[in-house]
Image (cartoon, rainbow, N blue to C red):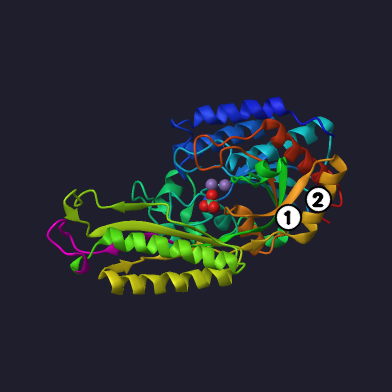
Amino acid sequence: MLDIDLERAAKFFESLASATAAHPGVTRDSYGTGEQKAHDLLAAEAQTLGLEVTNDNAGNLYMTLPGRDRDLPRVVLGSHLDSVPHGGNFDGAAGVIAGIIVLEAFRRWGVAPRRDICVMAIRAEESTWFPLSYIGSRAALGNLAPEELKSLRTDNARSLAWHMAKAGYDPDSVARGEAFLHPGQVACFLELHIEQGPQLLARDLPLGLVTGIRGSLRYRNACCIGEYAHSGAVPRNSRKDAVFGAASLVMGLDSLWQELESDGHDLTITLGQLQTDSKEHAFSKIPGLVRFCVDFRSLSEETLNLLDQRLHALCDSISQSRSVRFELGPRSGSTPALMDEEILNKLGSSAQKLGIPVYNMASGAGHDASVFANAGVPSGMVFVRNAHGSHNPDEGMDIEDFGLGCRLLAALLSQDNFPD
Ligand code: HGY
Ligand code: MN
Ligand code: MN
Protein backbone atom coordinates (compact mmCIF):
# COMPACT_ATOMS: atom_id res chain seq x y z
CA MET A 1 0.00 0.00 0.00
CA LEU A 2 2.92 2.34 0.35
CA ASP A 3 4.99 1.94 -2.78
CA ILE A 4 4.18 5.11 -4.61
CA ASP A 5 6.29 5.35 -7.79
CA LEU A 6 8.31 8.47 -6.94
CA GLU A 7 10.73 7.85 -9.78
CA ARG A 8 7.86 8.12 -12.25
CA ALA A 9 6.67 11.27 -10.49
CA ALA A 10 10.12 12.90 -10.53
CA LYS A 11 10.57 12.10 -14.23
CA PHE A 12 7.16 13.56 -15.00
CA PHE A 13 7.90 16.78 -13.14
CA GLU A 14 11.13 17.08 -15.15
CA SER A 15 9.41 16.55 -18.49
CA LEU A 16 6.77 19.10 -17.53
CA ALA A 17 9.39 21.67 -16.51
CA SER A 18 11.35 21.28 -19.75
CA ALA A 19 8.24 21.34 -21.94
CA THR A 20 7.08 24.62 -20.40
CA ALA A 21 10.44 26.22 -19.61
CA ALA A 22 10.53 30.02 -19.93
CA HIS A 23 13.80 31.04 -18.33
CA PRO A 24 13.69 31.84 -15.60
CA GLY A 25 11.17 29.25 -14.40
CA VAL A 26 8.13 27.99 -16.30
CA THR A 27 5.28 29.80 -18.03
CA ARG A 28 2.05 27.87 -18.54
CA ASP A 29 -0.20 30.66 -19.78
CA SER A 30 -3.97 30.15 -19.38
CA TYR A 31 -5.40 28.92 -22.69
CA GLY A 32 -1.97 29.46 -24.22
CA THR A 33 0.82 27.20 -25.49
CA GLY A 34 2.37 26.62 -22.06
CA GLU A 35 -0.80 25.38 -20.41
CA GLN A 36 -1.70 23.34 -23.50
CA LYS A 37 1.65 21.52 -23.43
CA ALA A 38 1.02 20.59 -19.80
CA HIS A 39 -2.46 19.29 -20.65
CA ASP A 40 -1.10 17.25 -23.56
CA LEU A 41 1.57 15.65 -21.35
CA LEU A 42 -0.96 14.70 -18.68
CA ALA A 43 -3.46 13.31 -21.22
CA ALA A 44 -0.72 11.17 -22.79
CA GLU A 45 0.35 9.88 -19.36
CA ALA A 46 -3.27 9.02 -18.48
CA GLN A 47 -3.66 7.16 -21.76
CA THR A 48 -0.58 5.01 -21.04
CA LEU A 49 -2.25 4.11 -17.73
CA GLY A 50 -5.42 3.06 -19.52
CA LEU A 51 -7.52 5.74 -17.80
CA GLU A 52 -10.63 7.17 -19.47
CA VAL A 53 -9.61 10.58 -20.85
CA THR A 54 -12.02 13.35 -21.82
CA ASN A 55 -12.43 17.16 -21.88
CA ASP A 56 -15.33 19.42 -21.08
CA ASN A 57 -16.43 22.43 -23.13
CA ALA A 58 -14.02 24.73 -21.31
CA GLY A 59 -11.03 22.45 -21.97
CA ASN A 60 -10.67 21.01 -18.47
CA LEU A 61 -9.15 17.53 -18.65
CA TYR A 62 -10.63 14.48 -16.86
CA MET A 63 -8.67 11.23 -16.38
CA THR A 64 -10.79 8.52 -14.75
CA LEU A 65 -10.21 5.14 -13.12
CA PRO A 66 -13.61 3.43 -13.35
CA GLY A 67 -15.17 2.30 -10.08
CA ARG A 68 -17.05 -0.94 -9.38
CA ASP A 69 -20.32 1.00 -9.19
CA ARG A 70 -20.28 3.65 -11.91
CA ASP A 71 -23.63 5.09 -10.87
CA LEU A 72 -22.24 6.42 -7.60
CA PRO A 73 -21.16 10.09 -7.44
CA ARG A 74 -17.50 10.19 -8.39
CA VAL A 75 -14.50 11.34 -6.39
CA VAL A 76 -12.73 14.22 -8.15
CA LEU A 77 -9.17 15.15 -7.26
CA GLY A 78 -6.81 17.50 -9.00
CA SER A 79 -5.69 21.10 -9.38
CA HIS A 80 -4.75 23.61 -12.07
CA LEU A 81 -2.02 23.28 -14.72
CA ASP A 82 -1.50 26.93 -15.60
CA SER A 83 1.17 29.00 -13.88
CA VAL A 84 2.04 32.64 -13.39
CA PRO A 85 4.62 34.03 -15.87
CA HIS A 86 8.11 32.70 -14.98
CA GLY A 87 6.63 30.77 -12.08
CA GLY A 88 7.51 27.54 -10.36
CA ASN A 89 6.99 23.98 -11.59
CA PHE A 90 4.86 22.73 -8.68
CA ASP A 91 2.07 25.29 -8.12
CA GLY A 92 -1.03 23.43 -9.36
CA ALA A 93 0.81 20.71 -11.28
CA ALA A 94 1.72 18.85 -8.06
CA GLY A 95 -1.99 18.23 -7.40
CA VAL A 96 -2.68 16.84 -10.85
CA ILE A 97 0.43 14.65 -10.92
CA ALA A 98 -0.38 13.38 -7.41
CA GLY A 99 -3.74 12.17 -8.74
CA ILE A 100 -2.11 10.35 -11.62
CA ILE A 101 0.54 8.79 -9.36
CA VAL A 102 -2.16 7.54 -6.97
CA LEU A 103 -4.18 6.00 -9.84
CA GLU A 104 -1.00 4.42 -11.24
CA ALA A 105 -0.44 2.82 -7.84
CA PHE A 106 -4.08 1.60 -7.73
CA ARG A 107 -3.60 0.04 -11.17
CA ARG A 108 -0.38 -1.67 -10.01
CA TRP A 109 -1.91 -2.84 -6.72
CA GLY A 110 -5.04 -4.05 -8.55
CA VAL A 111 -7.26 -1.77 -6.45
CA ALA A 112 -10.73 -1.45 -8.02
CA PRO A 113 -12.31 1.52 -6.19
CA ARG A 114 -15.99 1.40 -5.24
CA ARG A 115 -16.73 4.60 -7.22
CA ASP A 116 -15.09 6.37 -10.18
CA ILE A 117 -11.98 8.31 -9.22
CA CYS A 118 -11.43 11.19 -11.61
CA VAL A 119 -8.24 13.27 -11.79
CA MET A 120 -9.07 16.76 -13.08
CA ALA A 121 -6.54 19.09 -14.72
CA ILE A 122 -8.18 22.47 -14.34
CA ARG A 123 -7.79 25.39 -16.74
CA ALA A 124 -6.93 28.99 -15.95
CA GLU A 125 -6.80 29.14 -12.15
CA GLU A 126 -4.18 31.89 -12.06
CA SER A 127 -5.84 35.29 -12.27
CA THR A 128 -2.75 36.95 -13.76
CA TRP A 129 -3.69 36.10 -17.37
CA PHE A 130 -7.38 36.99 -17.31
CA PRO A 131 -8.72 39.38 -14.63
CA LEU A 132 -10.93 36.59 -13.23
CA SER A 133 -10.58 33.95 -10.52
CA TYR A 134 -10.99 30.21 -11.01
CA ILE A 135 -12.12 30.22 -14.65
CA GLY A 136 -11.77 26.47 -15.30
CA SER A 137 -13.37 25.11 -12.14
CA ARG A 138 -16.25 27.62 -12.32
CA ALA A 139 -16.81 26.75 -15.98
CA ALA A 140 -16.87 23.02 -15.16
CA LEU A 141 -19.65 23.70 -12.62
CA GLY A 142 -21.56 25.97 -15.03
CA ASN A 143 -20.83 29.08 -12.93
CA LEU A 144 -19.01 31.34 -15.40
CA ALA A 145 -21.13 34.38 -16.31
CA PRO A 146 -21.55 35.12 -20.06
CA GLU A 147 -19.87 38.55 -19.77
CA GLU A 148 -16.82 36.92 -18.20
CA LEU A 149 -16.17 35.18 -21.53
CA LYS A 150 -15.58 38.68 -22.94
CA SER A 151 -12.71 39.38 -20.49
CA LEU A 152 -9.49 40.20 -22.29
CA ARG A 153 -6.20 38.47 -21.62
CA THR A 154 -3.84 41.02 -20.09
CA ASP A 155 -0.98 40.41 -22.56
CA ASN A 156 -2.76 40.14 -25.91
CA ALA A 157 -6.17 41.80 -25.47
CA ARG A 158 -7.91 38.74 -26.94
CA SER A 159 -11.06 37.55 -25.14
CA LEU A 160 -11.42 34.42 -23.02
CA ALA A 161 -14.01 33.13 -25.53
CA TRP A 162 -11.53 33.64 -28.36
CA HIS A 163 -8.87 31.66 -26.48
CA MET A 164 -11.28 28.86 -25.57
CA ALA A 165 -12.46 28.54 -29.19
CA LYS A 166 -8.89 28.71 -30.53
CA ALA A 167 -7.96 25.83 -28.21
CA GLY A 168 -10.83 23.85 -29.77
CA TYR A 169 -13.45 24.19 -27.03
CA ASP A 170 -16.97 25.63 -26.89
CA PRO A 171 -17.23 29.04 -25.17
CA ASP A 172 -20.88 29.42 -26.20
CA SER A 173 -21.91 26.38 -24.18
CA VAL A 174 -19.80 27.68 -21.26
CA ALA A 175 -21.61 31.04 -21.57
CA ARG A 176 -24.93 29.17 -21.42
CA GLY A 177 -23.82 27.72 -18.09
CA GLU A 178 -23.80 24.12 -19.33
CA ALA A 179 -22.05 22.27 -16.52
CA PHE A 180 -19.89 19.19 -16.98
CA LEU A 181 -19.81 18.56 -13.23
CA HIS A 182 -22.98 18.66 -11.11
CA PRO A 183 -22.35 19.00 -7.34
CA GLY A 184 -24.83 16.16 -6.60
CA GLN A 185 -22.75 13.82 -8.79
CA VAL A 186 -19.43 14.70 -7.14
CA ALA A 187 -18.94 12.84 -3.86
CA CYS A 188 -16.01 15.08 -2.89
CA PHE A 189 -13.18 17.19 -4.31
CA LEU A 190 -9.60 16.73 -3.04
CA GLU A 191 -6.66 18.96 -3.92
CA LEU A 192 -3.02 18.39 -3.06
CA HIS A 193 -1.06 21.65 -3.40
CA ILE A 194 2.26 23.09 -2.28
CA GLU A 195 1.81 25.40 0.71
CA GLN A 196 3.44 28.34 -1.09
CA GLY A 197 4.31 29.87 2.29
CA PRO A 198 6.82 29.27 5.15
CA GLN A 199 4.68 27.65 7.86
CA LEU A 200 5.37 23.92 7.28
CA LEU A 201 9.08 24.64 6.78
CA ALA A 202 9.12 26.60 10.05
CA ARG A 203 7.43 23.70 11.84
CA ASP A 204 9.63 21.13 10.06
CA LEU A 205 6.51 19.22 8.98
CA PRO A 206 6.02 17.58 5.56
CA LEU A 207 2.25 18.02 5.22
CA GLY A 208 -0.54 20.40 6.26
CA LEU A 209 -4.31 19.84 6.26
CA VAL A 210 -6.28 22.87 5.12
CA THR A 211 -9.14 24.15 7.30
CA GLY A 212 -10.25 27.05 5.09
CA ILE A 213 -9.24 29.10 2.04
CA ARG A 214 -9.01 32.86 2.08
CA GLY A 215 -11.23 34.86 -0.25
CA SER A 216 -10.01 37.98 -2.02
CA LEU A 217 -11.11 41.51 -2.88
CA ARG A 218 -9.10 43.16 -5.64
CA TYR A 219 -8.63 46.34 -7.59
CA ARG A 220 -6.34 45.41 -10.50
CA ASN A 221 -6.20 48.72 -12.38
CA ALA A 222 -6.20 51.49 -9.79
CA CYS A 223 -4.40 54.80 -10.10
CA CYS A 224 -3.52 57.95 -8.21
CA ILE A 225 -3.83 61.09 -10.35
CA GLY A 226 -1.93 64.30 -9.57
CA GLU A 227 -0.44 66.96 -11.83
CA TYR A 228 2.86 66.94 -13.71
CA ALA A 229 4.85 70.07 -12.84
CA HIS A 230 8.37 71.42 -12.41
CA SER A 231 10.20 69.49 -9.64
CA GLY A 232 11.95 72.59 -8.32
CA ALA A 233 9.56 75.45 -8.87
CA VAL A 234 6.48 74.26 -6.95
CA PRO A 235 6.29 74.62 -3.13
CA ARG A 236 5.19 71.58 -1.08
CA ASN A 237 1.66 72.72 -0.30
CA SER A 238 0.82 73.51 -3.93
CA ARG A 239 1.95 70.16 -5.29
CA LYS A 240 -0.33 67.43 -6.62
CA ASP A 241 2.24 64.69 -6.32
CA ALA A 242 0.87 61.25 -7.33
CA VAL A 243 3.86 59.40 -5.87
CA PHE A 244 3.45 61.01 -2.45
CA GLY A 245 -0.27 60.29 -2.72
CA ALA A 246 0.27 56.63 -3.53
CA ALA A 247 2.98 56.32 -0.88
CA SER A 248 0.60 57.78 1.75
CA LEU A 249 -1.92 55.13 0.72
CA VAL A 250 0.68 52.36 1.06
CA MET A 251 1.70 53.53 4.54
CA GLY A 252 -1.96 53.98 5.50
CA LEU A 253 -2.75 50.42 4.44
CA ASP A 254 0.25 49.11 6.35
CA SER A 255 -0.93 50.68 9.61
CA LEU A 256 -4.49 49.50 8.85
CA TRP A 257 -3.11 45.94 8.54
CA GLN A 258 -1.37 46.21 11.91
CA GLU A 259 -4.54 47.66 13.50
CA LEU A 260 -6.87 44.96 12.16
CA GLU A 261 -4.42 42.12 12.82
CA SER A 262 -4.09 43.19 16.47
CA ASP A 263 -7.91 43.24 16.60
CA GLY A 264 -7.81 39.55 15.62
CA HIS A 265 -8.75 39.86 11.94
CA ASP A 266 -7.27 37.39 9.43
CA LEU A 267 -5.97 39.33 6.42
CA THR A 268 -3.20 40.10 3.97
CA ILE A 269 -2.75 43.29 1.93
CA THR A 270 -0.56 43.38 -1.18
CA LEU A 271 0.12 46.01 -3.81
CA GLY A 272 1.74 43.76 -6.41
CA GLN A 273 2.30 46.48 -9.01
CA LEU A 274 3.11 50.15 -8.40
CA GLN A 275 4.47 52.29 -11.22
CA THR A 276 4.74 55.80 -12.60
CA ASP A 277 3.97 56.21 -16.28
CA SER A 278 7.16 55.57 -18.24
CA LYS A 279 5.77 57.52 -21.22
CA GLU A 280 5.45 60.77 -19.24
CA HIS A 281 7.50 60.57 -16.05
CA ALA A 282 10.92 62.22 -15.85
CA PHE A 283 13.61 63.08 -13.37
CA SER A 284 12.70 66.74 -13.05
CA LYS A 285 8.90 66.39 -13.15
CA ILE A 286 6.51 66.06 -10.23
CA PRO A 287 4.77 62.77 -11.13
CA GLY A 288 1.17 63.16 -12.21
CA LEU A 289 0.18 59.50 -12.36
CA VAL A 290 0.85 56.30 -10.42
CA ARG A 291 -0.80 53.00 -11.42
CA PHE A 292 -1.19 50.27 -8.79
CA CYS A 293 -3.21 47.19 -7.83
CA VAL A 294 -4.62 46.10 -4.46
CA ASP A 295 -5.06 42.46 -3.42
CA PHE A 296 -6.90 41.98 -0.08
CA ARG A 297 -7.22 38.40 1.26
CA SER A 298 -9.14 37.10 4.27
CA LEU A 299 -10.95 34.05 5.60
CA SER A 300 -13.82 36.38 6.49
CA GLU A 301 -16.16 38.18 4.07
CA GLU A 302 -16.82 40.73 6.81
CA THR A 303 -13.11 41.58 7.05
CA LEU A 304 -12.91 41.94 3.26
CA ASN A 305 -15.84 44.37 3.30
CA LEU A 306 -14.30 46.32 6.19
CA LEU A 307 -11.02 46.58 4.25
CA ASP A 308 -12.92 47.94 1.26
CA GLN A 309 -14.60 50.62 3.37
CA ARG A 310 -11.33 51.65 5.01
CA LEU A 311 -9.56 51.75 1.63
CA HIS A 312 -12.13 54.20 0.31
CA ALA A 313 -11.89 56.31 3.49
CA LEU A 314 -8.08 56.42 3.16
CA CYS A 315 -8.32 57.48 -0.49
CA ASP A 316 -10.74 60.26 0.43
CA SER A 317 -8.56 61.68 3.21
CA ILE A 318 -5.33 61.52 1.14
CA SER A 319 -7.13 63.16 -1.80
CA GLN A 320 -7.95 66.06 0.52
CA SER A 321 -4.54 66.39 2.13
CA ARG A 322 -2.51 65.98 -1.07
CA SER A 323 -4.88 67.40 -3.70
CA VAL A 324 -4.71 64.22 -5.74
CA ARG A 325 -7.49 61.81 -6.67
CA PHE A 326 -7.80 58.06 -6.75
CA GLU A 327 -9.57 55.98 -9.36
CA LEU A 328 -9.80 52.39 -8.07
CA GLY A 329 -11.39 50.95 -11.21
CA PRO A 330 -13.34 47.65 -11.35
CA ARG A 331 -13.44 45.45 -8.26
CA SER A 332 -13.08 41.66 -8.47
CA GLY A 333 -12.55 38.91 -5.95
CA SER A 334 -13.46 35.49 -4.64
CA THR A 335 -15.43 34.09 -1.68
CA PRO A 336 -13.72 32.54 1.35
CA ALA A 337 -14.39 28.80 1.71
CA LEU A 338 -14.39 26.25 4.53
CA MET A 339 -13.07 22.74 3.95
CA ASP A 340 -15.31 19.79 4.88
CA GLU A 341 -14.94 18.87 8.57
CA GLU A 342 -15.41 15.13 8.01
CA ILE A 343 -12.85 14.96 5.21
CA LEU A 344 -10.44 16.96 7.36
CA ASN A 345 -10.88 14.46 10.21
CA LYS A 346 -10.50 11.44 7.89
CA LEU A 347 -7.32 12.96 6.42
CA GLY A 348 -6.07 13.49 10.00
CA SER A 349 -6.80 9.93 11.13
CA SER A 350 -5.29 8.43 7.95
CA ALA A 351 -2.15 10.52 8.47
CA GLN A 352 -1.95 9.30 12.05
CA LYS A 353 -2.24 5.63 10.95
CA LEU A 354 0.53 6.24 8.40
CA GLY A 355 2.66 7.95 11.05
CA ILE A 356 2.79 11.18 9.04
CA PRO A 357 2.86 14.29 11.27
CA VAL A 358 0.48 16.97 9.93
CA TYR A 359 -0.57 20.52 10.89
CA ASN A 360 -4.07 21.94 10.42
CA MET A 361 -3.87 25.39 8.84
CA ALA A 362 -5.73 27.98 6.76
CA SER A 363 -4.69 28.66 3.17
CA GLY A 364 -3.61 32.21 2.35
CA ALA A 365 -3.51 31.48 -1.34
CA GLY A 366 -6.64 30.87 -3.37
CA HIS A 367 -7.39 27.39 -4.74
CA ASP A 368 -9.97 25.70 -6.95
CA ALA A 369 -11.08 23.70 -3.90
CA SER A 370 -12.82 26.89 -2.71
CA VAL A 371 -15.01 26.85 -5.85
CA PHE A 372 -16.06 23.24 -5.21
CA ALA A 373 -16.63 23.89 -1.49
CA ASN A 374 -18.77 26.96 -2.22
CA ALA A 375 -20.75 24.94 -4.80
CA GLY A 376 -21.66 22.50 -2.01
CA VAL A 377 -19.14 19.76 -2.84
CA PRO A 378 -17.43 18.42 0.32
CA SER A 379 -13.81 19.41 -0.26
CA GLY A 380 -10.42 18.82 1.31
CA MET A 381 -6.86 19.99 0.69
CA VAL A 382 -3.46 18.55 1.55
CA PHE A 383 -0.55 21.00 1.66
CA VAL A 384 2.97 19.83 0.86
CA ARG A 385 5.90 21.67 2.42
CA ASN A 386 7.83 23.63 -0.19
CA ALA A 387 10.95 25.76 -0.19
CA HIS A 388 11.39 29.28 -1.57
CA GLY A 389 7.72 30.24 -1.51
CA SER A 390 5.86 30.31 -4.83
CA HIS A 391 4.99 32.36 -7.91
CA ASN A 392 8.73 32.48 -8.56
CA PRO A 393 11.21 30.28 -10.51
CA ASP A 394 12.91 29.02 -7.32
CA GLU A 395 9.74 27.35 -6.00
CA GLY A 396 10.92 24.01 -4.66
CA MET A 397 9.28 20.79 -3.42
CA ASP A 398 10.95 17.69 -1.97
CA ILE A 399 9.79 14.58 -3.86
CA GLU A 400 9.72 12.58 -0.61
CA ASP A 401 7.28 15.10 0.91
CA PHE A 402 5.22 14.87 -2.28
CA GLY A 403 5.29 11.06 -1.86
CA LEU A 404 3.86 11.35 1.67
CA GLY A 405 1.02 13.44 0.28
CA CYS A 406 0.32 10.80 -2.37
CA ARG A 407 0.39 8.04 0.24
CA LEU A 408 -2.12 9.95 2.34
CA LEU A 409 -4.47 10.39 -0.63
CA ALA A 410 -4.04 6.71 -1.62
CA ALA A 411 -4.80 5.53 1.92
CA LEU A 412 -7.97 7.64 2.00
CA LEU A 413 -9.19 6.78 -1.51
CA SER A 414 -8.62 3.05 -1.12
CA GLN A 415 -11.21 2.99 1.69
CA ASP A 416 -14.59 1.88 0.33
CA ASN A 417 -16.37 4.05 2.87
CA PHE A 418 -14.64 7.26 1.73
CA PRO A 419 -16.07 9.82 1.57
CA ASP A 420 -19.12 7.89 2.86
O1 HGY B 1 -3.84 34.15 -6.38
C1 HGY B 1 -3.89 33.06 -5.82
O2 HGY B 1 -4.02 32.94 -4.61
C2 HGY B 1 -3.75 31.79 -6.64
O3 HGY B 1 -2.39 31.48 -6.71
N1 HGY B 1 -4.30 31.97 -7.95
MN1 MN C 1 -2.13 27.21 -7.24
MN1 MN D 1 -0.70 30.21 -8.11
Question: Label 2 is placed on what type of residue?
Answer: Gly
> Which label is found at residue 188?
1
Q: Is residue 58 visible?
A: no
- List x then y, in percent, for residue 132: 47, 57
| Range covered by the magenta-colored residues | 219-237
Q: Residue visible at 44% across and 60% down?
A: 148
Q: Nearer the viewer, mark 2 or mark 1?
A: 2
Q: Secondary structure at mark 2?
A: helix
Above or below, 41 against 269 in this view is above
Q: Is residue 341 visible?
A: yes
Q: Quadrant of the C terminus?
A: bottom right
Q: Secondary structure at mark 1?
A: strand
Is 149 included in the stretch rendered in magenta?
Answer: no
Q: Quadrant of the N terminus?
A: top right
Is the C-beta separation of discs 2 and 1 under 8 Å? no
Q: Residue visible at 35% across and 46% down?
A: 155
Above or below, 393 against 303 in this view is above
> Which label is found at residue 91?
none
Is the CB of the residue bearing disc 1 within 8 angstroms of ligand 2? Answer: no
Above or below, 251 against 203 in this view is below
Q: Is residue 355 left or right of residue 24?
A: right
Q: Which residue is mark 2?
A: 348
